[in-house]
Amino acid sequence: MGKKWQGHAVILAAALLCLTAGAVKSRPAKPAVPARPAEISAGPLAELVILVDAGHGGTDGGARAKDSGTWEKEINLQTALALREALEDAGARVIMTRETDGEYSRNKRADLTARLELAKQGEADLLISVHMNEYRSRKESGPQVFYRAGQAQSQRLAEDIQAAMIRELKPQKERAALAGDYFMLSLDIPSVLVECGFLSNAREEKLLLSSAYRQRVAQAIRDGVTAFVNR
């Protein structure tokens, strides 16, 4: 092979490497599913396996904050990571659908199906999907928890988390848990989708961009889960 062709080969190899790296970045590696412990761990949520889903990711940015321009997927991830820490501190074993910015597929249904498969493989007891809300009116505010209609245990979990978020975050508008038709809530285990606040509301956007406030959100969700378990 002549020097000219060797040079072309090196350039082609480098280009292929860059394309491969980009593809890997857009699809998060499947997280290890924690095995159920042989021993009993300490804490009010001991022995529970909880799937925490950071909604959106990769090419799916979700909603966008009106003032800062921050994508929902970024705030979801930071909140979900804080929630993992809070749940683990209470003794739970947590499965994360993603720990970085990525997606399993650019096809939305395939991406969500892959996330639900993690819950099945890990024999999760509960599922919590973390999201941020938005609305055309900037006056709308307040966290809100959704469950699938007809699932009594999911409704109880949603109501307990909603009550804890109202009690501990003291939002300007107190909302009630509602039934919602979300694919992430299609499993038979107690499952909720938590809209932690409105990115279209200037005050709540500032709060949700704060690490300290996201920790409060995570602790409120954990306390709601604890109330559900102790019923």
Image (spheres, rainbow, N blue to C red):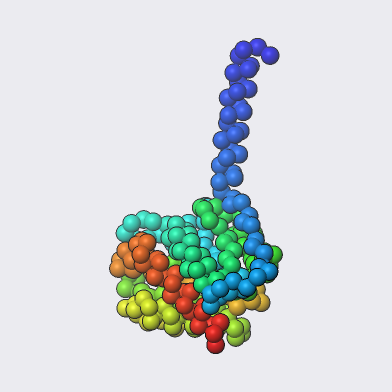
Quarter occupied by residue 215: bottom left
Q: Quick one: which residue is furthest to the left in this view?
A: 203
Residue 7 vs 98, above or below: the answer is: above
Quarter of the image with the N terminus is top right
In-image side of 175 versus 67 (left or right): right
Q: How many callouts does the rendering have? A: 0
Q: Residue at x 54, y 87 (%)?
A: 231
Can you give x and y, in whole percent of width and height, for residue 20 in the image?
60, 39
Q: Residue at x 63, y 55 (%)?
A: 30
Can you give x and y, in whole percent of width and height, for residue 191 in the image?
58, 75
Q: Residue at x 52, y 53 (%)?
A: 100
In-image side of 104 versus 223 (left or right): right
Q: Quick one: which residue is furthest to the top in this view?
A: 2
Q: Quick one: which residue is furthest to the bottom in this view?
A: 231
**Between residues 117 and 42, which one lies in front from this camera angle?**
42
Can you give x and y, in whole percent of width and height, for residue 86 in the image?
48, 68
Q: Residue at x 65, y 61 (%)?
A: 33
Can you give x and y, in whole percent of width and height, for residue 210 in the image?
34, 62
Quarter occupied by residue 118: bottom right
Does residue 176 appear in this view? yes
Does residue 127 appear in this view? no
Residue 171 vs 78, above or below: the answer is: below
Residue 201 vs 30, above or below: the answer is: below
**Between residues 3 and 106, which one lies in front from this camera angle?**
3
